[in-house]
Structure formats: structure tokens, C-alpha cells
Image: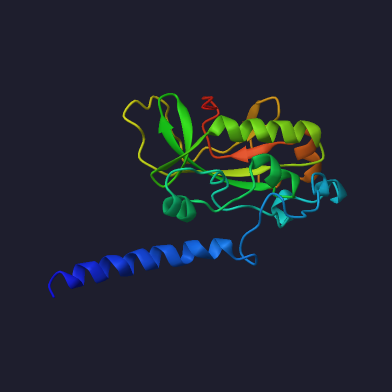
Amino acid sequence: MQLLHPVLGMLGLFYALASPAFAHSDDAYSHDAKDAFTDKSAWMSAIRDNVRLSELALAGTHDSATFDTSVFPIVDDIVRTQTLNFDEQLKYGIRVLDLRIRRTGDAFALHHGPVYLDKMFGNALQSIERFLKANPSETVLFRIKEEHTAASDATIAWRRSSTVTWSSSRACSSSRPQATSHSARRAGSSCCCPISPNSTPWG
């Protein structure tokens, strides 16, 4: 009887973890890259130049880098919150990315908690750069959060309070919340992110 309680406890824990994960198979909850999405690559072109970015309701994704994870089936199902890659997310209208990083060496690795997502911060920047060069009417914002303890070999600093504007030419400048669609477009379809402008942790 004493052995039964731990076994039941473990079964209960597994069920609690697995039940939300299995919801991913529900068509009402999950989407696939093969679904019939509408191309929204240039939807911001219809916005007036004098509209402030802070006045817009921008579509975003949670834990944007968690697509194509491959750790362990039940872990993958819990970790994965996206099925579309960065290019696809931007193509179908997403304009705010949620990027969780871990400092490792002189670069930023993309994580979901302790799980490395087999991607670096530079992979996200490359996708954004490609997209903005092809769609100069658009602006992409991204939020960066330090998700996991830095690796022992981390040499790059982290400044939580820094906010900069990154353009497709990787030039950095101060970002202001009152920026308009017009000023963002003239800046090279800029991306705003909380990161030190004195470092280049592209990974």
C-alpha cells in the first residue's frame, strides 16, 4: 500500500503534464504550416504614416522560437508553442516576436526554460532582416527575455534596461514609444529590442 501512493502520484503528475500537451492535436487549438493561411506580408502598408506604433494592436506569438523542437516526444509537446518558423510567422502577419535567450559564450542561444531550441538569436535576426528587405512597408518588434541561467563560459553582458532600434542594416539608435509608422519605415523598417547597443550577440 505504501508503494501504491508514489505510483499513483507519478501517474497523476504525468496526466497533469500530458493532458494540456495533447490539446495540440485539436484543430481549434493548433495550426500547421500547410494550413490555408492568407499572405499578410505587407498589411502595414495600409496604415497611415502618422499613426504611432504605440496605437497599433500588433499580432504576436508566444515563445516564438519553439517550432521544430526535438528533445523527447512528451517534452517536445510541452515545450513547443509554435508550428510556424520565423519566416512563416512574419509572412502570415505576425509583427511581434517573443524571444527567450540564454547567454552562452559570446552569443545568445534561444531557449524555452532550460531547453535549448537548436536556434540562436542570429537565426531570428536573419529571418527578420530578409523579411524587412523584401517588405519595406513593415515594422517588426521583438521582446527579449533572459530565460535561463547563463552558461559558465558566457562573456557577453546583459542590460535589462537598454532599448534600441535595429534596422535591416544593423544600425542601432534610441527607440521612442511615440515613433510613427512613417519614421519606422524611414529608419529601415526597424525592430525594437531590449539589448545593449554596444554588443552584437547575433549567434
Task: Give the number of marks.
Answer: 0
Give the image location of residue 197, x and y in percent. Answer: 55, 28
Residue 145 in the image: above or below residue 129 = below
Residue 192 to residue 59: above or below: above
Q: Percent x, y for residue 72?
A: 42, 47
Residue drawn at x 73%, y 56% is 55
Can you see residue 187? no
Q: Residue at x 61, y 52 (%)?
A: 61
Nearest the camera: 85 or 195?
85
Residue 41 location, quadrant = top right
Q: Is residue 153 left or right of residue 59?
A: left
Say if 142 sits above or below 13 in the image.
above
Q: Nearer the viewer, residue 126 or 33?
A: 33
Residue placed at 47% from the left, 65% from the top? Answer: 20
* Residue 154 percent across, percent down from the top left: 37, 27
User: Tell me, what colour scheme is on the image?
Assistant: rainbow
Percent x, y of residue 148: 39, 42
Image side of residue 27 versus residue 199, left or right: right
Residue name at image x 42 percent, y 33 percent: 103
Q: Is residue 22 above or below residue 47?
A: below
The answer to whether residue 96 of the structure is visible from this angle is: yes
Q: Which residue of the protein is positioned furthest toward the left in this rendering?
A: 2
Quick one: 37 or 61, which is closer to the camera? 37
Which of the image's four quarters has the N terminus? Answer: bottom left
The answer to which quarter of the image holds residue 59 is bottom right
Q: Left or right? Give the position of 79 relative to 135.
A: left
Judging depth in this view, the residue of 2 and 175 nearest the camera is 2
